[in-house]
C-alpha cells in the first residue's frame, strides 16, 4: 500500500476514493475491506480507473464472527443479512479481523458500539484471540455513556474485561497523542453512532483522533455505521473558521448528510494534511457497511438503536436534533429533563401563540403542537413551561435546519422574554454570527436560508467526492 503526498490512505469505497484523489490531483492506493475479503485498487492523478470491492454485495453463507444468527421474529438482529444493513464491525469480523492482524489495538467507542445482536464490540474483540485489544477510549458521555452533556466518565478499568479505559473528552492534538502513546497501541479503532449534525461532538472526536494518531504515528480504522437521518443531502450553514470549536472544528454543513466513514475521508482529504494542522494525515482505513443507501432512515436498517448520548433516546430525536439543538444557544429549554428532548421546546411564560406562529410558516413535513412540560433538570428545572412539540409527518420533505430557524424566528417574535445566551453560543452552533444578526434584524426563514446557500453549494460539491454509498 502506498501513501499519497496528502496522506490519504486506505479509504474504503473505490468510487469515493478515486474521485477524491483525482479531484485533489494526487496518486492514491486504496484497500477496500468488504464482507468476504479485500479488494485493492489504484489510481494515478488524471487517470480514470475502475474499481470493485469483493464481497460488498450479496448475502454471506453464515453469520459473521461477533454476531449470532437467531431465527426470524426476534427483532432487528433476526433479519436476514440481505434484509438489513451490515455495519463496519460486521464486515471487519467477516474478514477475520485481517486489518487488525499483528497490531496492538485500542477501541474508541461508547454504548452504541454493538453487534447486530446487541453485544458490545469490546466484549467480542476481547474474547477473540485473533485481536490484541489492549485499551479502550471513551468520548464525551463516557465509554459506558453515563455522563451528561459536557462531561465524561474519566479513566479507570472496564469491569467486564479488565481493560484500561482512557478518557479522550476535551483532549486533542499532542495531549491526545500522548494518551495513545501511553496506552501502547498501534491502531485506534473508532466505532460510535453519529446522528448527522455538525455540533454532535463524536465526529470531532474522530477528527481529533485522526490528527493525534498522525502526531503519534498510529493508524486509524473507522468502522462505519448508518447516518440515522439518511444521507440524501447536506443542509444548513457551513461553519466559518473563526467560529470553530469542539462543536465544529472545520467548514462542513450543519446537517452534513454523511456517515462517520465518509467524514473520515473528507477530514483526511481536505483538512488534516498541511502546515499548521498535522504534518500528514493519519494512516486511515474505513471499513464500510453493506446494505445502506442514502435515502434510508434508521428504522430501515434492521439494526438495534442504542441512545448515543443520554438525551438522544430515539431516532426521532436525531431527526429533529439538527434544528432544535440551536435552542441551546437561547434561554429556552430544548427539552432536556423530559422524555422527548429536542422534540419538545419551551420556557416559563410561553403559550399557544408560538405554536400558532410556527404553524403559520407552513414548513414542509412538520406540525407544531402546543405543549406544556416540567423539566426534571437543566433549564427551568421543576417549573411548568409552555412551548411546542414537533410532529414530523413527512420525513422526506422535512428540513430540520429550516424548522429550527423557523422556531427561533417565531419564538423571538411571540415571546418578549426571548434572549440569546450571553456568550453567543448560537454563533458556535450555527457556525457564524449571521443567523443571530439576521434574526435580530427581523429576517425570515427564507432570507436567512438564502444567506447560507452559496456556502452550502460549495460544500455539497466537495462532499460528493467522498461519498461511499449509493
Image (cartoon, rainbow, N blue to C red):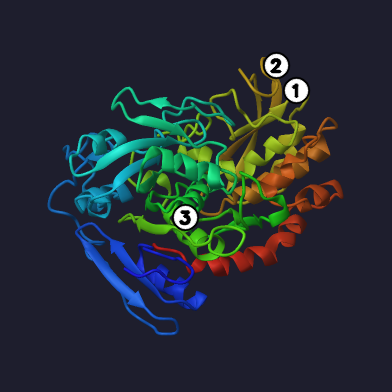
Which one is nearer the viewer's eye here, 462 or 353? 462
Task: Give the label, 1 or 3, closer to the camera.
Answer: 3
Give the Cα separation between the discs numbered 3 and 2. 49 Å
174, 191: nearer the viewer: 174
Q: Is residue 35 above or below residue 458?
A: above
Q: Are marks 2 and 1 in contact (CB under 8 Å)?
A: yes
The residue to which callout 2 is attached is 383
Q: CA distance from mark 1 to mark 3?
A: 49 Å
Q: Earlier in the sequence, mark 1 or mark 3?
A: 3
Instruction: Compute the Cα span from label 2 to label 1.
Output: 7 Å
Q: Earlier in the sequence, mark 3 or mark 2?
A: 3
Per the image, label 2 sits on a secondary structure element best described as loop
Q: Which mark is residue 359?
A: none
Where residue 350 sits in the image (x, y, percent)? 76, 27
| Mark 2 / mark 1, whichever is N-terminal | 1
The residue labelled by disc 1 is: 348
Q: Residue at x 27, y 50 (%)?
A: 100
Q: Nearer the viewer, residue 135 or 194?
A: 135
46 displayed left or right of 91: right
Mark 3 residue crowding within 10 angstroms, few (<14) / some (14–19) / many (20+): many
Q: Is residue 180 above or below residue 44?
A: above
Asked which quadrant contains residue 448, the reply is: bottom right
Q: Is residue 115 visible?
A: no
Q: Mark 3 sits on what residue? A: 214
Rendered-image quadrant of the C terminus: bottom left
Q: Is residue 111 visible?
A: yes
Question: Helix, strand or loop at disc 3?
Answer: helix
Amino acid at each position: 500500500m502506498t501513501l499519497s503526498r496528502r496522506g490519504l490512505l486506505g479509504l474504503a469505497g473505490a468510487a469515493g476514493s478515486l474521485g477524491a484523489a483525482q479531484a485533489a490531483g494526487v496518486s492514491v492506493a486504496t484497500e477496500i475491506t468488504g464482507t468476504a475479503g479485500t479488494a485493492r485498487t489504484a489510481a494515478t492523478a488524471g487517470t480514470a480507473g475502475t474499481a470493485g470491492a469483493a464481497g460488498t454485495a450479496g448475502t454471506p453463507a453464515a453469520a459473521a464472527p461477533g454476531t449470532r444468527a437467531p431465527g426470524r421474529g426476534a427483532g432487528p438482529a433476526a433479519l436476514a443479512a440481505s434484509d438489513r444493513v451490515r455495519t463496519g464491525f460486521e464486515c471487519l469480523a467477516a474478514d477475520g479481523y485481517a486489518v487488525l492482524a499483528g497490531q496492538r489495538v485500542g477501541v474508541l467507542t461508547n454504548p452504541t458500539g454493538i453487534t447486530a445482536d446487541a453485544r458490545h464490540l469490546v466484549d467480542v474483540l476481547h474474547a477473540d484471540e485473533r485481536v490484541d485489544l489492549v485499551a479502550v477510549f471513551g468520548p464525551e458521555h463516557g465509554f459506558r455513556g453515563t455522563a451528561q452533556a459536557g462531561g465524561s466518565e474519566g479513566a479507570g478499568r472496564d469491569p467486564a474485561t479488565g481493560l484500561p479505559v482512557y478518557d479522550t473528552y476535551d483532549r486533542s492534538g499532542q495531549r491526545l497523542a500522548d494518551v495513545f502513546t501511553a496506552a501502547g497501541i498501534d491502531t485506534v479503532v473508532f466505532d460510535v453512532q453519529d446522528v448527522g449534525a455538525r455540533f454532535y461532538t463524536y465526529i470531532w472526536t474522530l477528527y481529533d483522533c485522526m490528527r493525534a494518531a498522525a502526531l503519534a504515528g498510529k493508524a486509524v480504522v473507522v468502522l462505519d455505521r448508518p447516518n440515522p437521518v439518511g444521507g440524501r443531502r447536506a443542509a444548513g450553514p457551513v461553519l466559518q473558521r473563526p467560529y470553530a470549536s469542539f462543536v465544529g472544528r472545520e467548514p462542513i454543513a450543519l446537517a452534513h448528510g454523511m456517515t462517520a466513514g465518509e467524514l473520515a475521508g473528507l477530514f483526511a482529504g481536505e483538512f488534516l494534511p498541511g502546515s499548521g494542522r498535522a504534518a500528514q494525515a493519519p494512516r486511515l482505513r474505513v471499513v464500510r457497511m453493506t446494505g445502506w443507501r442514502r435515502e434510508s432512515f434508521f428504522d430501515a436498517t434492521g439494526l438495534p438503536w442504542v441512545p448515543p448520548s443520554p438525551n438522544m433516546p430515539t431516532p426521532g430525536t436525531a431527526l429533529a436534533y439538527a434544528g432544535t439543538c440551536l435552542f441551546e444557544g437561547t434561554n429556552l429549554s430544548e427539552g432536556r429533563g423530559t422524555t422527548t428532548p429536542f422534540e419538545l421546546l419551551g420556557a416559563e411564560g410561553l403559550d399557544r401563540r408560538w405554536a400558532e406562529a410556527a404553524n403559520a410558516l407552513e414548513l414542509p413535513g412538520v406540525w407544531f403542537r402546543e405543549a406544556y412540560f416540567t423539566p426534571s433538570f437543566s433549564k427551568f428545572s421543576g417549573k411548568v413551561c409552555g412551548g411546542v412539540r414537533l410532529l414530523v409527518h413527512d420525513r422526506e420533505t422535512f428540513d430540520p435546519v429550516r424548522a429550527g430557524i423557523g422556531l427561533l424566528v417565531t419564538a423571538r417574535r411571540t415571546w418578549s422574554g426571548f434572549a440569546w445566551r450571553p456568550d453567543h453560543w448560537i454563533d458556535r452552533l450555527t457556525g457564524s454570527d449571521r443567523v443571530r444578526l439576521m434574526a435580530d434584524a427581523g429576517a425570515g426563514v427564507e432570507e436567512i436560508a438564502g444567506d447560507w446557500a452559496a456556502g452550502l453549494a460549495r460544500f455539497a460539491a466537495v462532499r460528493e467526492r467522498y461519498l461511499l454509498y449509493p
